Amino acid sequence: MDFLNLKDISERYRSELKEAAAQVIDSGYYIRGPKTEEFESNLCGYLGCKNTVGTGNGLDALKLIFRAYIELGVMSVGDEVILPANTFIASLTAVIESGLKPVIADIDTKTLNIDITAIEPLITSKTKAIMPVHLYGRCCWDEELKSLAQQYNLKIVEDNAQAMGAKSAIKGFGESYMCGALGDAAGTSFYPVKNLGALGDGGAVTTNDDKLAEVIRALGNYGSEEKYIHKYAGVNSRLDEIQAAMLCVKLKYLDQENARRQEIAEIYDKQITAKQIIKPLLSKNGECVWHQYVIRTENRDKLMQKLGEKGIPTMIHYPTPVHKHEAYKELNTLTLPVAEKCATEIISLPINPAMSNQEAIIVAEAVNESC
Ligand SMILES: *Cc1c(COP(=O)(O)O)cnc(C)c1O
């Protein structure tokens, strides 16, 4: 059994992907061409948002949002952004590399997402944004988060790298319920293992803010709106035509693939019965698209080893909270007890659209036997 075999995922759409790649090869447009436009428009339609700007990867998407807010005078270098301790390092990198100061919040044991009740005490006069991360594919959005942002005049920048297709129970700032269209802007990643994965690097910013989108599009193209006129000190970060073509194909099947992930999560929820295991909340209305299925147990290392011996691959997302990495020494003295404890208990079971029900049952039984 594989944790995730990308070849099995591509295999499902093989002929369509090949045809789409061939069309790009024959078109002569490889960067900023019609496929990128088509994909950007399709993603806007899917999310119910006004703008999608393709970027080179997910990290750049998040960075370009902050860079653009700085260009627009909404934020200044040194301002603070509140983000969760449990996330992939890129969420933190995006804040730091944009010249902003990360303020790390603890997490909620029920969702393993940011603890929304922990945010308000962290707000200072320098706070300009909250970055909820829809981690493991689980939507992180509620009335309290919305009203905090409104009350303190903060931007909400969603890290939507893991939750394409997930829905909130309540509307965002616009009319949409979709993760990626809830806050002021969202960065997403099309890294191949994501729920909406390309066949290489890719990312996008999605936003209802036209001005922000315009600045981001320019910033990602050397700060230029018009050839050889450089309005901003920009970078090179663009989605390419081949990846956009792959994504046009894969977006059509995203809901189907997420539904399949949901079925596997339901099997796990029903079949994992060992009382030592804390299972994730089962998603009822599409609020989780199961990028990962993460259980918790006190004997995590033992469970992981026993599962390995039975041929069941597992992973840990993530073994170290973002404030405890050697690279970011200035954060190391922080203590965020919930995130730190959870990091020792979490274990991700295989979940992907190419898995069979039978495989999910085998995994669940192995978990029950290995506790
Ligand atoms: C994957 C990921 C990113 C970064 O995306 P890249 O395309 O790898 O740059 C950011 N945040 C989270 C939560 C991710 O999982």
Image (cartoon, rainbow, N blue to C red):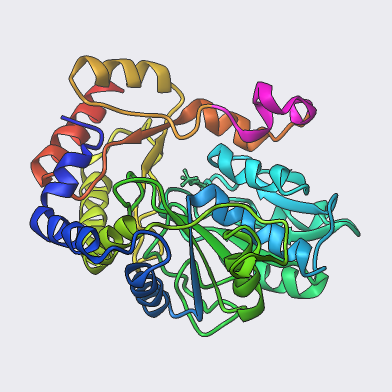
* Residue 279 at x, y percent in the picture: 37, 43
What residue is rendered at 51% in x and 85% in y? 175
Relative vertical location of residue 308 with respect to residue 50 in this rendering, above or below:
above
The residue lying furthest to the bottom in this view is 175
Decide: is 219 above or below 306.
below
Which residue, as the protein is rendered here, is positioned at the far front? 228
Task: Identify the image quadrant of residue 327.
Answer: top right
Q: Is residue 205 visible?
A: yes
Left or right of 60 in this view: 124 = right
Left-right relation of 187 to 305: right
Q: Is residue 4 above or below residue 266?
A: above
Quadrant occupied by the N terminus: top left
Residue 32: in magenta span: no
- In the rendered view of the protein, which quadrant contains the C terminus? top left
Q: Which of these two is toward me, 322 or 214?
A: 214
Residue 168 x, y percent position in the rendering: 47, 70
Magenta segment: 320-333
Taking the spot 75% from the left edge, 45% from the top edge, the residue there is 102
Which secondary structure dominates the residues rendered in magenta?
helix
- Residue ranking furthest to the right: 125
Tell me if 365 is positioned left or right of 152 in this view.
left
